Amino acid sequence: MVLQQLGLQHFLALSAILFSVGLFGVISRRNSIAILLGVELMLNAANINLIAFQRYLAPPAGLNLVLDGQIFALIVITLAACEAAVGLAIILNVYRVLRTTTADEVSLLKW
C-alpha cells in the first residue's frame, strides 16, 4: 500500500508546508477573512502532526488501542469551528459598523 511507503518525515514535511502557507496568509493578508483562513490552515497542519505522531510513534495496536492523537485532533477541530464562528461574528459586526473587512481599519476602534 502507498501509506506504508510514506514515513513520518513525509507527513511532517506536508505539515510544515501547510503551516508555512497559513502563516504567510496570516502575516501578509489585510482582509480579515483571509487571516481566519490562514489560521485554519495552521490548525490543520497541527492536526496532521498529531495524527502522524500517533500513527508512527504509538505502540503496536493490540488490546490497548491508543487513540490520543486522534482525540486531540478532534478537540482541535472543535476549537477551530468555535474560533471560526466567533471570528466571523466579530467580522460581520465590524463590517456592519465600518463597511470594511480590512484588518488595518479595525484598529480605529481602539481610540
Image (cartoon, rainbow, N blue to C red):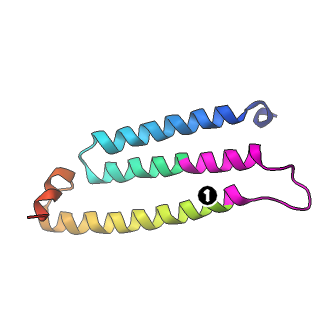
> Is 60 on the left-hand or right-hand side of 102?
right
In this view, which residue lies farthest toward the left?
111
Please name the amino acid that badge 1 sits on. Answer: Ala
Residue occupying image coordinates x 50% and y 52%: 43
Main SS, magenta region, reads: helix
How many marks the image carries: the answer is 1
Q: Is residue 51 magenta?
A: yes
Rendering quarter of residue 87: bottom left
Badge 1 crowding class, 10 Å Cα cut-off, few under 14, some 14 to 19, many 20 or more, is many
Helix, strand, or loop for circle 1?
helix
Q: Establish if 86 lies above or below 38.
A: below
Residue occupying image coordinates x 80% and y 35%: 4
Question: From where the camera sits, is residue 102 visible?
Answer: no
In magenta, the rendered stretch is 46-70
The residue that mark 1 highlights is 73
> Is 40 on the left-hand or right-hand side of 92?
right
Q: Is residue 10 magenta?
A: no
> Is 49 on the left-hand or right-hand side of 109?
right
Rendering quarter of residue 69: bottom right
Q: Position of residue 99 (x, y in %)?
A: 14, 60
Q: Establish if 50 lies above or below 80.
A: above
